[in-house]
Amino acid sequence: MNLKTSKPQNLKTSKKPVGFFDSGIGGTCILNAFRKLCPDVETVYIADSKNCPYGNKPAEEIIRLSEANVKKLLKKNCKMIVIACNTATAAAIDYLRAKYPHVPFVGLEPAVKPAALRSKTGVVGVLATAGTFHGRLYNETKDKFAKNVTVLAVVVDEFVLLVERGETSGAKVEKVVRAKIEPLLKAGADKIVLGCTHFPHLKAVIEKVCAGRAEVIDPSDAVARQAKRILEKMK
Ligand code: DGL
C-alpha cells in the first residue's frame, strides 16, 4: 500500500461538513445519533453499498475502499471523518491517520470494555464481522479489559445482508436473529455487544430475543458524543 502523506487544508473552518462512511446503510445509526447531538452541523454520508459487505474482505481491500471513501469526503470539504464502520476502522484507521495526519478521524470498535465491566455472569456475547474480530483494536481491548470474562465472538454476516435489504422486523428476521443469539444466552451471556453498525438497525428484534436475560449494548450514542467532543476541540 502506497503511503504518501496528503497536503493539509484548513480543516477548522466551522461551516465545513462532518463526513461519515460505512460499507452500507449501517452507519446511519451513528449519523442519526450525531445529528441529534449537533443538529446545526452539516453532514455528508457515504454508503458504499456496491462494495457491501466489507466484513469478509481482506484488510488490503478494505483499506483501498476506505481510502476511496475518505477522498470523496475530503472533496466535499469535510473537516472531520467518522468511520461509521467497525470493520473499516479495524482495517484502515491506522493507515488513514498516518496518511492524512491533518484530518481528525473517529473510529469504532466493539464495546467489549463496558460489557466486560458490567457483566454479572462473566460471559459476554459480541456480534461483529470477521474483519473486526481480526483487528488490532478489538484484540487489544479484549486482552486488556476482558481477561477475566468469557467472550463469545460470533460473526453474523446474515444480519448485515438483512439490513441492507431493508428487512429489520417480522417473523423471518426474528428467526434469523434468534438462531444466532439464543446459543449465547444459553451459554450465560448477560451482555450482547452490537459490534457492527448494521446491527442497531435490528435492535428492536435483538432486544425482544434478549428480553429479561441480557442487556444489548449499542455504541451509537457514545460514538456520537465522542465525535462531538472532538469537533468542539477543533473550534
Ligand atoms: N457496518 C460494518 C461494521 O460496522 C460492517 C458491515 C459489512 O460487513 O460490510 O462493521
Image (cartoon, helix red, strand yellow):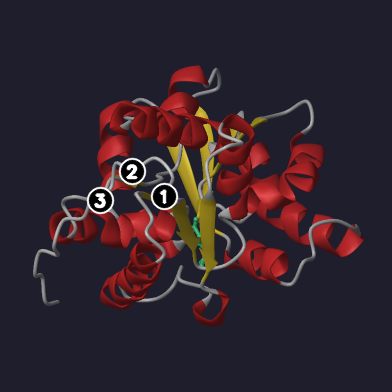
Please tell me which residue is depicted at 29% across the width and 70% down the height of the picture: 63
Name the residue beneath numbered marker 3. Answer: 103
Q: Give the amino acid at mark 1.
A: Lys
Name the residue beneath numbered marker 1. Answer: 16
- The reply to whether callout 2 and callout 1 are in contact (CB within 8 Å) is yes
Which one is nearer the viewer's eye here, 98 or 73?
73
Q: Quadrant of residue 95?
A: bottom left
Secondary structure of the residue carrying numbered label 2: loop
Please tell me which residue is depicted at 55% across the width and 22% down the height of the picture: 121
Give the percent coordinates (x, y) of residue 16: 41, 49
Residue 13's disc number? 2
Depth check, mark 3 against mark 1: the one in front is: 1
Q: Quadrant of residue 164?
A: bottom right
Q: Give the amino acid at mark 2.
A: Thr
Q: Check the image and report above or below for 137 versus 212.
A: below
The reply, left or right, for residue 146 in relation to residue 210 is left
Q: Give the amino acid at mark 3.
A: Val
Please tell me which residue is depicted at 42% across the width and 36% down the height of the picture: 227
Depth check, mark 3 against mark 2: the one in front is: 2
State which tag comes first along the sequence, 3 or 1. 1
Give the percent coordinates (x, y) of residue 122: 49, 24
Q: CA distance from mark 3 to mark 2?
A: 13 Å
Q: Check the image and report above or below for 223 versus 131.
A: above
